[in-house]
Amino acid sequence: GQQLNQSPQSMFIQEGEDVSMNCTSSSIFNTWLWYKQDPGEGPVLLIALYKAGELTSNGRLTAQFGITRKDSFLNISASIPSDVGIYFCAGQNYGGSQGNLIFGKGTKLSVKP
Amino acid sequence: EADIYQTPRYLVIGTGKKITLECSQTMGHDKMYWYQQDPGMELHLIHYSYGVNSTEKGDLSSESTVSRIRTEHFPLTLESARPSHTSQYLCASSGTYGSLRGYTFGSGTRLTVV
């Protein structure tokens, strides 16, 4: 089945630093999504991307849908302690079980004050 | 406010007990999902449903079972809990076919079997 390679697996950064993470796939997706999971909670949607090449921002977060439709990246600028959590990328296509999200394994972000 | 609710949030139970984890959504979503996640680890799809009376097994084999008798309700049952079932269980829902807006997740049930 389809798989997503998400990297890095974990990051430990200083407050104020910028963060970059990405996801790649061997097959194309029609939609890329980025979620954040706080400790003890369910994932929450941060950004959804629907078009190849699309660049979308949500506050300090910026995500892009790769031109090949096989990758996406998420940047966080000027990180703060509440950015701590696990970030998941997800790809989605149309129809049947293919409409199910395919999730990456997550990037665990730790921020040192 | 439209949302998705999971109960209980935390459950500690003895080996061999039967348990049901509840999941309800008020968004009118057709599709619902159950994921199993060990702390800090990846999400594993164990069950999904595309509507009433529809249930399918996910990518990760699970001894749990699910039912979908009402659109808004998707409970997960373990007939005989074991320590290996200790994990976090996340329920999610999404809109109808063609709605590519991802899933809405509940807050999860943290299950501990002793």
Image (cartoon, coloured by chain):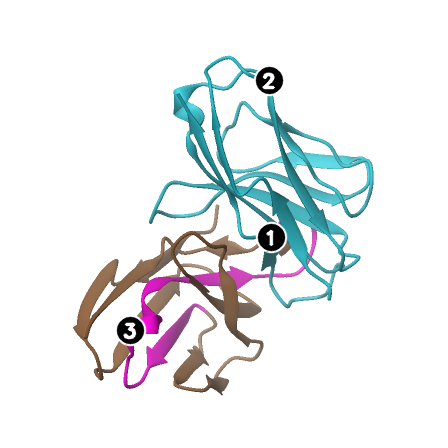
Q: Earlier in the sequence, mark 3 or mark 1?
A: 3
Q: Amino acid at mark 1?
A: Asn
Q: Chain of mark 1?
A: A
Residue of label 2: B79
Q: Quadrant of residue B104?
A: bottom right
Residue A45 horizontal/vertical position (percent): 53, 68
Vertical placement of residue B95 versus B11, above or below: below
- Chain letter for brown, please: A
Which structural element holds mark 1? loop
Residue under the image location 48 percent in, 45 percent down: A1
Q: Are marks 3 and 2 on the same chain?
A: no
The disc placed on residue A81 is 3
Residue under the image location 82 percent in, 35 percent down: B69
Left or right of B59 in this view: A24: left
Q: Quadrant of the N terminus of chain B?
A: bottom right
Task: Say if the magenta span includes residue B110.
Answer: no
Disc 3 from disc 2: Cα separation: 41 Å
Which tag is nearer the camera, tag 3 or tag 2? 3
Q: Amino acid at mark 2?
A: Glu
Q: Chain of mark 2?
A: B
CA neighbours of label 2 inside 10 A, class few (<14), some (14 to 19), many (20+): some
The magenta region covers A70-98
Nearer to us in this view, A45 or A9: A45
Residue of label 1: A100
Residue under the image location 23 percent in, 60 percent down: A10
Which tag is nearer the camera, tag 3 or tag 1? 3
Residue A27 horizontal/vertical position (percent): 46, 60
